[in-house]
Image (spheres, rainbow, N blue to C red):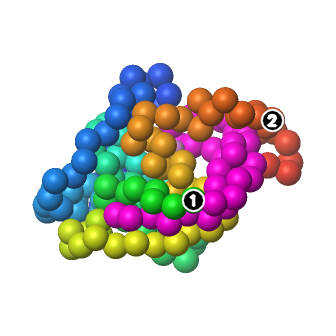
Amino acid sequence: MALRMIRDERDPILRKKSKEVREVTPRIKELTTDMLDTMYHANGVGLAAPQVGILKRVIVVDIEPEMRDPHVFINPQIIEQEGACMGQEGCLSVPNRVGEVERPTRIRLRYLDLAGQEQELEAEDFFARAICHEVDHLEGILFIDHPEFVPVDPEDPGVMD
Ligand code: NI
């Protein structure tokens, strides 16, 4: 297990656009393993490669970490989306801040899997939200950058991370 350092919002790398992965090499696979280890260790539900200082289009998501259901998406592209709803988010790179952001309620994602094969997946609700949040990171966008971002007091007992 190799943990990588999570960059925080002061790091300019988080505002940069990530590059396409041309080939799913052993190094990319190792990156995804490290990203999952780092995400679970930090009690997150998603992580994007730029958050560990790598400007490549790679994200990992597990919205039920206690079940260990990891998803790895390489070169993820949202090819369809519908609906819109506000919902709460946090980010491992933006500690101590939570707030509401508008996201689609359903998306269709095209991506490469770890075998380098093109795949598609439908995601709804919180899973779709988590994917959209991570795809934003690949564009250099943080959830607090959304124009409609509504901060929520993290001390509020109703707030979950
Ligand atoms: Ni994030």
Q: Which residues are magenta?
A: 82-111
User: Could you tell me what secondary structure mostly forms the magenta stretch?
Assistant: strand
Q: Is residue 77 visible?
A: yes
User: Label 1 sits on what residue type?
Assistant: Gln
Secondary structure, mark 1, is strand
Q: Is residue 155 left or right of residue 106?
A: right
Q: Is residue 147 left or right of residue 158?
A: left
Residue annotated with mark 1: 81
Foreground label between 1 and 2 = 1
The residue at 17%/61% (across/down) is 24
Question: Magenta stretch containing residue 105, yes or no?
Answer: yes
Residue annotated with mark 2: 153
Could you tell me how far apart the alpha carbons at marks 1 and 2 are, in whole angstroms? 30 Å
The residue at 41%/48% (across/down) is 48
Q: Is residue 20 left or right of residue 61?
A: left
Secondary structure, mark 2, is loop
Question: Magenta stretch containing residue 76, yes or no?
Answer: no
Instruction: Please tell me in which quadrant of the rendered image residue 18 appears.
Output: top left
Residue 156 locus on image (x, y percent): 85, 42
The residue at 46%/57% (across/down) is 78
Number of the label disc, if any, that sits on residue 91: none
Residue 105 locus on image (x, y percent): 67, 61
**Image quadrant containing the N terminus:** bottom left
Instruction: Please tell me in which quadrant of the rendered image residue 59 appears.
Output: bottom left
The residue at 51%/61% (across/down) is 80
Residue 32 locus on image (x, y percent): 30, 59
Instruction: Please tell me in which quadrant of the rendered image residue 37 appears.
Output: bottom left
From the viewer's perspective, is residue 156 above or below residue 109?
above
Residue 93 locus on image (x, y percent): 51, 37
